[in-house]
Image (cartoon, helix red, strand yellow):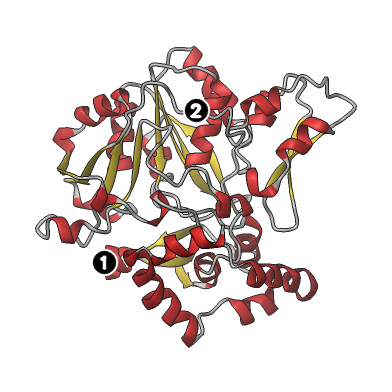
């Protein structure tokens, strides 16, 4: 099938669903491959060869463009919510909660990722309540299910409702491509994304339990030591870092993440939020054990929304350079041979074998990940090596 074949290169398909949700004949479905990532599959008997799927794909570089009113360079702030309880229950400085509170006050909807205990999947949903929004707080290091979210968003926007969408840069680009025009009451917030790991591997871990919730960050030891995968089973908390270890090793990340076209500051969103890891070097007094957010203001609309939440946050303006981190400068490096071997072993020997042989850091891997890699990033060596490889 000509049109879908052009989309189905795994290194240039992020699974954003723009093609499937735009198809006038609804003949494109998103189907999981053996790694658990979804790709578009066409029903050739119903396809009319209209080519809309190609036109809306944000990965067609000659087609993808930022909204025309985006700033050439983002306005950068370090910020944190004044409410300590909100910071404690958020990934970094609680800015998503403050932004979404503002939209909820306007009787608007919030679209974000939540963990569904019934399906054991992370799914994008739309809510108009604080309770529903609270389920969206906190990082979820796995690719979320979008289903028909874009279509639902369009319906609400055409009813003149406010809507805040939060997701990965590729998801926000997919939404904009699907909508084809700007809506004054749509606020798009993307995250500083380091890539998305496999939902299949997450399921392999969770199926041994009956989780009531999951968490990927825990601030009991402070924001800077918060990476911890926890499975909540009723009143019991189970710590299992296999998933995060496989993620940080780059073994279970989506192929397109190794070729990401959104690892830069030219965002399609109104606002970008994430951790401001370098804040201590800029202003040690602003450092906070409960977290500090990095905010990139990318558009006039984003600037307006940011101005409306000033009474709820503390913030300082910074230059762009200290806010830059790996995911704003370069995509994740693929450990090609190790990744290929992991998935071969998974198919042939099962997850328990992979958990035992790949789910933990060896002493050498610890040195590479915690000492050599940070030095390479700070000195620019990693960027040079990437250029040489090309």
Is the C terminus in the top left, top right, bottom left or bottom right quadrant?
bottom right
Q: Residues within 10 Å of mark 2 (few under 14, many from 20)?
A: some
| Residue at mark 1 | 222
- Residue 183, percent across and down? 43, 17
Looking at the image, residue 139 lies above or below residue 101: below
Looking at the image, residue 348 lies above or below residue 313: below
Looking at the image, residue 39 lies above or below residue 69: below
- Residue 108, percent across and down? 38, 23
Q: Residue at x 46, y 55 (%)?
A: 194
Residue 75 visible (yes or no): yes
The image quadrant that residue 374 belongs to is bottom left
Q: Residue at x 38, y 44 (%)?
A: 134
Q: Report the label total.
A: 2
Q: Is 352 placed left or right of 366 in the picture?
A: right
| Distance in Å between CA atoms under marks 2 and 1 | 39 Å
Looking at the image, residue 243 lies above or below residue 54: below
């Amino acid at each position: 099938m000509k049109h879908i074949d052009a989309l189905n290169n795994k290194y240039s398909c992020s699974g954003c669903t723009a093609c499937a949700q735009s198809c006038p004949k609804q003949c494109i479905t998103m189907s999981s491959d053996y790694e658990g990532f979804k790709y578009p599959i066409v029903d050739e008997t119903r396809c009319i060869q209209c080519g809309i799927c190609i036109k809306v794909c944000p990965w067609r570089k000659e087609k993808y463009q930022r909204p025309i009113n985006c700033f050439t360079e983002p306005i950068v702030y370090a910020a944190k919510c004044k409410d300590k309880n909100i910071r404690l229950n958020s990934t970094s400085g609680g800015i998503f909660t403050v932004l979404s509170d503002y939209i909820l006050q306007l009787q608007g909807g919030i679209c974000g990722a939540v963990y569904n205990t019934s399906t054991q999947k992370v799914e994008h949903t739309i809510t108009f309540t604080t309770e529903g929004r609270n389920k969206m707080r906190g990082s979820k290091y796995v690719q979320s299910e979008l289903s028909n979210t874009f279509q639902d968003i369009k319906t609400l926007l055409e009813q003149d409702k406010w809507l805040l969408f939060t997701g990965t840069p590729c998801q926000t680009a997919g939404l904009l491509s699907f909508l084809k025009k700007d809506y004054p009451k749509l606020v798009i917030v993307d995250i500083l994304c380091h890539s998305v790991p496999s939902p299949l591997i997450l399921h392999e871990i969770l199926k041994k339990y009956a989780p009531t919730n999951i968490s990927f960050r825990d601030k009991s030891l402070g924001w800077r030591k918060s990476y911890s995968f926890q499975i909540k089973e009723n009143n019991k908390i189970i710590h299992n870092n296999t998933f995060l270890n496989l993620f940080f090793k780059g073994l279970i990340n989506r192929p397109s993440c190794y070729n990401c076209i959104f690892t830069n500051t030219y965002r399609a969103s109104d606002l970008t939020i994430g951790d401001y890891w370098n804040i201590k070097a800029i202003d040690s007094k602003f450092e906070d054990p409960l977290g500090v957010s990095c905010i990139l203001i990318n558009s006039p609309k984003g600037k307006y929304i940011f101005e409306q939440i000033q009474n709820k946050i503390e913030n300082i303006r910074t230059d762009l350079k200290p806010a830059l981190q790996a995911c704003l400068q370069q995509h994740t490096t693929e450990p090609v041979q190790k990744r290929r071997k992991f998935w071969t072993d998974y198919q042939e020997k099962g997850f328990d074998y992979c958990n035992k042989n790949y789910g933990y850091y060896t002493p050498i891997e610890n040195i590479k990940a915690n000492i050599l890699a940070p030095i390479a990033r700070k000195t620019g060596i990693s960027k040079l090596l990437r250029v040489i490889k090309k």
